[in-house]
Amino acid sequence: MWKQNPDQVNKFPLFSLDEFKGSELFHKELNFLEILDTQIEEAMGLISGRTDTVLILKTANSHSMAALRRAFVSLLESGEKIPVVVKVSYPDQTADMTMLYSATDVGGLLVDGLGDGILISLEKEGDHTRTEVVEQVKLHNSVSFGVLQAARTRMSKTEYISCPSCGRTLFDLQETTAMIRKRTDHLKGVKIGIMGCIVNGPGEMADADYGYVGSGKGKITLYKGKEVVKRSVASEKAVDELINIIREDGMWIEPETI
């Protein structure tokens, strides 16, 4: 399809292994080669020394992460340095299972430094309405960026650390988390800890940029990193005070209005 496309500069070709082997025409900057894990050895002979190619690696093995890891080991042993996007597909799985499988199959590789991206295929079984497909695209985008952020491969949104809540929590943790998220979810790369009590909270959110920690009935302690910035802030004002701290620290940006 790319060969017949009138715009061969801003559009990039996707090749199968056989197409790549038989092609004489490539994009001068970026080409995608989609292969199975079992084809990695053959592919390495074609991509050796190339700087214009990105591998899209997938597997038909039910033990996805193990099979993909073996392919990465072969790539590492060859000494080839080439970007790899891991492609997975979970046809007609629920949203929760798609998140679980993606985090396991791809996240487990990314945290070990294997791979540069994630591609969740849009393949679905049976007939589906446009609305269902659009919802799947939204889910896949959200899950993909979530996995990349959790693996520290790409930071694209605000990150929140929250405790599971216990008897020491003296405020509605879920409601407060939702309120903080609503006000701050546009702060790309910022990490905010939201903890129910002063006992374990500071330790559990030790790597957060800012912290919101319950310190008594109706009272909140606010942190910048590991440092206490404000104590005994009334819970009604605590979210605004947290935003003021972020603002004073130069990390605040105004949310975009659509």
Image: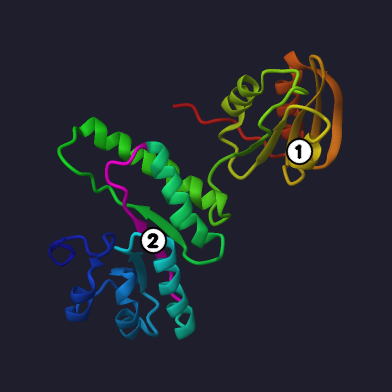
Check disc 1 and give the amino acid type.
Answer: Asp
Quadrant of residue 98 in the image? top left
Q: Is residue 69 above or below residue 106?
A: below
Name the spot of residue 61 as percent of width and height, x first.
32, 63
**Label 2: few (<14), some (14–19) or many (≥20) C-alpha neighbours in 10 Å:** some
Q: Name which residue lies at 47% across and 53% down.
A: 104
Main SS, magenta region, reads loop
Q: Is residue 92 above or below residue 20?
A: above
Q: Is residue 32 magenta?
A: no
Q: Name which residue lies at 29% across and 70% down.
A: 35
Q: Secondary structure at mark 2?
A: helix
Magenta segment, which residues?
Answer: 81-94
The residue nearer to you, when weighing 217 against 188, is 217
Q: Is residue 92 magenta?
A: yes
The reply, left or right, for residue 233 in relation to residue 99 is right
**Label 1: few (<14), some (14–19) or many (≥20) C-alpha neighbours in 10 Å:** few
Q: Secondary structure at mark 1?
A: loop
Mark before the other along the chain sequence, 2 or 1? 2
* Quadrant the N terminus occupies: bottom left
The reply, left or right, for residue 121 in relation to residue 66 is left
Check disc 2 and give the amino acid type.
Answer: Ser
The reply, left or right, for residue 172 in relation to residue 24 is right
Name the spot of residue 47 as percent of width and height, x first.
34, 81
The residue nearer to you, when weighing 7 against 232, is 232
Name the spot of residue 202 as percent of width and height, x first.
80, 38
Reading the image, the residue beneath label 1 is: 249
Q: Name which residue lies at 29% across and 60% down.
A: 10
Mark drawn on residue 64: 2
Q: Is residue 217 above or below residue 63?
A: above
Q: Is residue 93 above or below residue 18?
A: above
* Quadrant the C terminus occupies: top left
Mark drawn on residue 219: none
